[in-house]
Amino acid sequence: MAVSPKVRQPFLWNLLFILTYLSISTIRIVDFRIFGRQTIYFMKYVFSLWVLFFTFSCAKSNFPKGTPNCIQDKIQEMEKLGDATCSVYRYTNQGTEVYLVYPGCCDQFEVLYDSGCNYICAPSGGFTGKGDGKCNNLELQNKTLIWKAK
């Protein structure tokens, strides 16, 4: 399974940070007798700059605040498929947040999940277009787009 570029970028920055920190630490050990306290102040300065850099360079999430990680994982799976008709919407159903996943092309169920990614039902889709028939008291309100394929 390939790692998403959004996950790979902070890893590479952290690896670069660790290597830089180790190289500065070895410089301090070798040159401490020559430069004295100046080396320690230099290390603190460089370390502070790296911390600021990493704080602001971490990958930002493209999902609205409060989107569960499991829904984000499902979206990343759909991104790999490359279907331009996939999308995910957040609704409110009887006071709880639910997520409707439109899988894209060709007679697939549009699946409704709760915030823990537990399957609730499929309100539409399939060969008949009427879903799986298990969505009885469904009251979807407050439609919000979470993600749409590009």
Image (cartoon, rainbow, N blue to C red):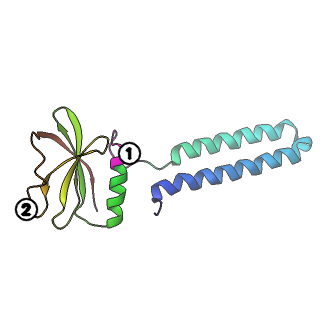
Figure check: 60 above or below 126: above
Sequence-wise first label, 1 or 2: 1
Magenta span includes 67: yes
The residue lying at 18 percent from left, 58 percent from top is: 109
Q: Residue at x 7, y 62 (%)?
A: 128
SS at mark 1? Answer: helix
Label 1: few (<14), some or many (≥20) within 10 Å? Answer: few
The residue positioned farthest toward the right in the image shown: 33
Residue at the disc numbered 2: 128
Quadrant where the image shows the C terminus: bottom left
> Could you say which is closer to the camera, residue 130 or residue 62?
130
Q: Residue furthest top?
A: 95
Instruction: Give the left or right position of residue 143, taking residue 53 as reference.
Output: left
Q: Which mark is residue 52?
A: none
Tell me which residue sits at (63%, 45%) in the image.
50
CA separation in Å, label 1 and label 2: 32 Å
Q: Which residue is mark 1?
A: 69
Does residue 99 lie above or below 84 as drawn? above
Residue 115 percent coordinates (x, y): 29, 40
Q: Position of residue 90 (x, y in %)?
A: 23, 44
Q: Callout 2, which amino acid?
A: Thr
Question: Where is residue 25 drawn, in percent x and y?
Answer: 78, 46
Q: Magenta segment range?
A: 61-71
**Amino acid type of disc 1?**
Asn
Q: Quadrant of residue 65?
A: top left
Position of residue 68 measured from the top left corner of the image (x, y, whole percent): 35, 42
Q: Which mark's residue is nearer the viewer, 1 or 2?
A: 2
Magenta residues, dominant SS class = loop
Quadrant of res 28: top right
Between residue 115 and residue 65, name the one nearer to us: 115
